[in-house]
C-alpha cells in the first residue's frame, strides 16, 4: 500500500543559514502579498480572476525588477503562488474567508520547497536543502521512500523545524478486530463502550498560572526592547511545551484505538459552533477533539480501521442503551447518572452515550 506521510524533525541551522531562511521567508511573504493585491485589483477592474499560470509568468518579470528575489529558492516562491491560488479556491468553494495579507510580525512562519533532482536528501547527520546546503538535523524517525517536498518552519520559540512529505510503500498493518463507540468530553477525554474512561490531562490548566505570569511579564516590557524579545521567547516556549504534551497524548491514544479496533464509532461534532460558547471555548480548544479525529482518520488507513460518524444531533446521552427510551431530562449537563423510567436500568451518562454511539454506528452500515 502506497501512502504519503509527513515527518517532522528539528534542524539546527548556522547563523548564515538562519539568515538565508529568514530572507526566503520574507521573499515568499512578499510574493504572496504582492500577487494577492494584483489578483484583487484585477478582479475589481475587470470582474474576472487570473490563474496561477499567469501569476507564475508575472513572477518571472517581477524577479527581473527586484533582484533580491533571486536570492531566495525559486521553487519556494512558486509554492507561495500555489498557496495563494489554493486560498482563492477555498474561498470560492466557501471553505474559507477571503485571503488576507501575511504579516512579517507573525512569529510562526514557514515556506515549502519541492524536491527536484534529489535536491532534498539525507547526508549522514545532515539534510541538504536547496539554497541552504547541509543543515544539521535530529533524525528521530527512519525515512524510507522518496521525499516529495519539504517545509521549513520557524516557530515562535525561535526553534527551526523541517517537515518532510515522504511517499512510501507500507504493508497494511493488522488491528485486533474490535468494535468501539467513543464519547468525547471535557472532564474525561473520552469514555468508550467497553466501560473505559480516559481522563483529560488538561495540560493548559495545569500550567495556566505560569503562562499568565509570563504574559504579565511580557506586557510590562518596553516594546521594541531586547528584554521584551527575550520574554516573548519565554512565553512562546511555555506554549510550545503545552502543545507538545497535548500532541504526544493524542498520538498515543489514537494509535491505541486504531490498533485494537476494526470499527470506531464517533460523533460528528461541529466544533467551530461549540467554540462560540465563551464559557467552554478554552476547555474545548485545550482538549483538541478536532486534532484527535484527524489522527484517527489518517491512522485508520494504515490499520484498515473503519471510522463511522453518527449524526450531530443524535441524542446519545438521553437514550437508554438498554431499551431505547428517550429521557429528555438528561439534556441538562449536570445530570451525570440517571435511572431509566422504563426499564429501571442505571446509567452513567458518558458510558451510556458511548454505547449508543456504537449501536447507531453499527446500524448505519446495514
Image (cartoon, rainbow, N blue to C red):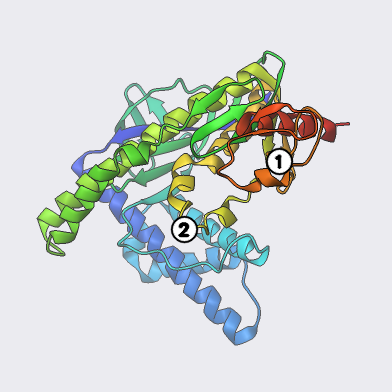
User: Taking 95 as reference, is 120 left or right?
Assistant: left
**Mark 2 = which residue?**
278
As helix, strand or loop, the secondary structure at mark 1 comes to loop
**Mark 1 = which residue?**
318
Q: Earlier in the sequence, mark 1 or mark 2?
A: 2
User: Taking 263 as reference, is 219 left or right?
Assistant: left
- Identify the residue at image location x=17%, y=50%: 231
Look at the image and tell me in which quarter the C terminus lies: top right
Q: In the rendered view, would you say 143 is above or below 280?
A: above
Q: Residues within 10 Å of mark 2 (few under 14, many from 20)?
A: few
Look at the image and tell me in which quarter the N terminus lies: top right
Q: In the rendered view, would you say 212 is above or below 337?
A: below
Viewer-closest of 149 and 305: 305
Viewer-closest of 103 and 22: 103
- Identify the residue at image location x=34%, y=54%: 24
Q: In the rendered view, would you say 130 is above or below 215?
A: above
Q: CA distance from mark 1 to mark 2?
A: 25 Å
Viewer-closest of 94 and 139: 94
* Disc 1 + disc 2, Cβ < 8 Å: no
Quarter of the image for residue 244 reads top left
Amino acid at each position: 500500500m502506497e501512502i504519503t506521510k509527513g515527518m517532522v524533525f528539528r534542524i539546527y541551522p548556522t547563523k548564515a543559514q538562519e539568515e538565508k531562511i529568514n530572507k526566503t521567508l520574507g521573499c515568499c511573504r512578499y510574493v504572496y502579498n504582492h500577487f494577492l493585491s494584483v489578483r484583487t485589483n484585477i478582479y475589481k477592474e475587470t470582474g474576472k480572476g487570473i490563474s496561477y499560470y499567469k501569476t507564475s509568468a508575472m513572477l518571472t518579470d517581477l524577479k527581473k525588477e527586484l533582484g533580491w528575489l533571486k536570492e531566495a529558492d525559486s521553487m519556494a516562491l512558486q509554492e507561495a503562488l500555489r498557496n495563494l491560488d489554493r486560498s482563492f479556491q477555498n474561498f470560492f468553494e466557501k471553505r474559507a474567508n477571503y485571503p488576507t495579507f501575511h504579516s512579517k510580525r507573525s512569529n510562526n512562519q514557514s515556506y515549502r520547497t519541492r524536491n527536484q533532482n534529489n535536491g532534498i536528501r539525507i547526508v549522514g547527520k545532515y539534510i541538504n536543502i536547496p539554497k541552504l546546503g547541509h543543515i544539521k538535523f535530529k533524525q528521530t524517525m527512519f525515512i524510507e521512500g522518496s521525499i516529495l517536498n519539504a517545509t521549513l518552519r520557524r516557530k515562535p520559540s525561535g526553534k527551526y523545524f523541517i517537515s518532510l512529505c515522504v511517499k512510501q510503500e507500507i504493508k497494511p498493518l493488522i488491528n485486533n478486530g474490535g468494535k468501539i463507540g467513543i464519547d468525547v468530553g471535557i472532564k474525561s477525554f473520552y469514555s468508550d463502550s467497553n466501560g473505559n474512561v480516559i481522563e483529560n490531562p488538561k495540560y493548559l490548566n495545569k500550567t495556566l498560572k505560569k503562562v499568565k505570569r509570563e504574559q504579565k511579564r511580557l506586557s510590562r516590557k518596553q516594546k521594541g526592547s531586547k528584554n521584551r524579545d527575550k520574554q516573548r521567547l519565554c512565553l512562546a516556549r511555555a506554549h510550545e511545551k503545552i502543545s507538545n504534551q497535548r500532541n504526544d497524548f493524542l498520538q498515543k491514544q489514537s494509535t491505541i484505538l486504531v490498533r485494537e479496533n476494526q470499527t470506531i464509532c464517533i460523533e460528528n461534532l461541529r466544533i467551530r459552533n461549540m467554540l462560540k460558547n465563551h464559557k467552554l471555548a478554552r476547555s474545548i480548544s485545550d482538549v483538541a477533539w478536532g486534532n484527535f479525529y484527524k489522527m484517527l482518520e489518517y491512522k485508520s488507513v494504515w490499520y484498515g480501521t473503519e471510522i463511522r460518524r453518527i449524526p450531530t444531533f443524535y441524542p446519545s446521552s438521553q437514550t437508554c442503551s438498554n431499551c431505547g427510551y428517550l429521557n429528555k431530562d438528561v439534556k441538562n449537563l449536570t445530570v451525570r447518572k440517571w435511572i431509566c423510567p422504563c426499564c429501571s436500568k442505571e446509567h452513567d451518562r458518558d458510558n451510556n452515550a458511548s454505547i449508543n454511539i456504537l449501536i447507531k454506528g453499527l446500524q448505519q452500515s446495514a
